[in-house]
Image: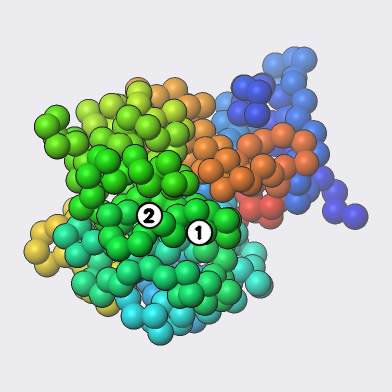
């Protein structure tokens, strides 16, 4: 039997902060409050591991390449505190999506040491609007349940982005939800009314809030307005480039369980240069990832930097942590991840007082950070 590991510090538990120790193997076994000041490691901050529900790439590889790409991506993001993620596709022909999902399924079936757990697929396209492609190529199609079921059989689709105003998309939402798929509204030219109707049909969230959707015009409110008025959950990219801090603050006040994603691309963890994003080429320069037109095209963000960015906006550390761990876990119904409590998976990050990573554990196994 493996001897449980013990760490000491300030621990963000499911019920709040505890100064003491956490004992774990693959799962958390015990959290104890300290009765004396131990000193030393007590300045460590121990948080749940980050859960990123929107990841395209890292380390020079893109999920759409298939093969071992998903493993490389999962290893790279684990070194930045992400302990679980969804591999996210680009709009593409079905054969290309199938190729990507086969590689992702292999990574799910045989996780390796040092990898974030790949929980499934975020299918971001091809069921989107030509008018709001963002960095997606113009290979859009209208969704059918037959196609979704074919893809879902290859690797579990946990989140699916669609434009609700297109064809029969709104009518498909209840069927998608019945498969256990979280339907998100995004890359949409729809109206506020389209967004509200989709939520009433069972849509659960919004893809990279404010980006790739109609906005908040006070005469003609769009999809973003529907999110601010009605959503319980929405994802947002907190790289401070995709969304102005003022808009982030507005969303934090309006959406109770706003959670954060990276939308990371192959440029993540890499020097400035040209990289793949699906079938397109993107350019990383000064921390931004853009198409040749200058439009933002995903990001080079990591979740540890997302945490620091949220704290820089004035969030307390527990609130920032919830938006990177607890809320995405709850959104997917993962009650054994995203929180530190007895019998939860031992997915955790250890930070210093400046919020720099010291250690990362995925299901109790320590990740080499370099």
Residue underneath mark 1? 176
Q: Closest to the observer: 80 or 203?
A: 203
- SS of the residue under disc 2: helix
Q: Residue furthest top?
A: 36
Residue 275 rendering spot, x and y as whole percentages: 26, 71
User: Which sits in the foreground, 72 or 236?
Assistant: 236
Whether residue 295 is visible to the viewer of this picture, yes or no, is yes
**How many numbered badges does the structure rendering display?**
2
Give the structural element (helix, strand or loop) at label 1.
helix
Residue 242 in picture, x, y percent from top left = 23, 45
Question: Distance between the Cα atoms at labels 2 and 1?
Answer: 10 Å
Q: Is residue 81 above or below residue 33?
A: below
Q: At which x and y percent is residue 284? A: 22, 61
> Which residue bears the numbered disc 2?
170
29 displayed left or right of 147: right
Q: Nearer the viewer, mark 2 or mark 1?
A: 2
Q: How is the image coloured?
A: rainbow
């Amino acid at each position: 039997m493996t001897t449980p590991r013990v760490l000491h510090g300030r621990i963000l538990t499911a019920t709040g902060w505890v100064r003491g120790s956490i004992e774990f193997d693959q799962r958390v076994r015990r959290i104890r409050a300290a009765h004396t000041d131990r000193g030393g490691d007590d300045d460590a901050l121990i948080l749940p591991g980050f859960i990123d529900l929107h990841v395209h790439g890292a380390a020079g590889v893109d999920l759409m390449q298939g093969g071992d790409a998903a493993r490389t991506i999962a290893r790279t993001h684990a070194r930045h505190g992400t302990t679980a993620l969804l591999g996210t596709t680009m709009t593409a022909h079905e054969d290309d999506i199938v190729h990507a999902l086969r590689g992702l399924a292999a990574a799910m079936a045989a996780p390796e040491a040092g990898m974030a757990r790949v929980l499934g697929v975020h299918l971001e396209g091809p069921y989107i609007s030509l008018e709001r492609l963002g960095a997606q190529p113009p290979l859009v199609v209208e969704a059918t349940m037959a196609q979704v079921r074919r893809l879902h059989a290859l690797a579990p689709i946990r989140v699916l982005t669609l434009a609700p105003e297109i064809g029969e998309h709104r009518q498909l939402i209840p069927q998608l939800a019945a498969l256990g798929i979280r339907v998100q509204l995004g890359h949409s030219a729809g109206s506020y009314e389209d967004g509200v109707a989709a939520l009433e049909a069972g849509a659960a969230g919004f893809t990279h809030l404010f980006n790739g959707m109609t906005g908040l015009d006070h005469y003609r409110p769009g999809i973003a307005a529907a999110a601010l008025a009605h959503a319980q959950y929405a994802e947002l990219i907190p790289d401070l480039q995709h969304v102005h801090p003022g808009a982030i603050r507005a969303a934090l006040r309006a959406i109770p369980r706003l959670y954060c994603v990276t939308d990371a691309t192959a440029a993540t963890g890499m020097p400035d240069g040209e990289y793949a994003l699906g079938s397109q080429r993107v350019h990383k320069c000064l921390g931004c990832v853009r198409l040749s037109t200058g439009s933002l095209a995903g990001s080079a963000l990591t979740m540890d930097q997302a945490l620091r960015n949220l704290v820089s906006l004035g969030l307390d550390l527990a609130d920032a942590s919830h938006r990177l761990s607890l809320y995405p876990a709850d959104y997917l119904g993962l009650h054994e991840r995203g929180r530190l409590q007895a019998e939860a998976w031992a997915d955790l990050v250890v930070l210093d007082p400046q919020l720099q990573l010291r250690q990362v554990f995925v299901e109790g196994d320590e990740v080499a950070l370099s």
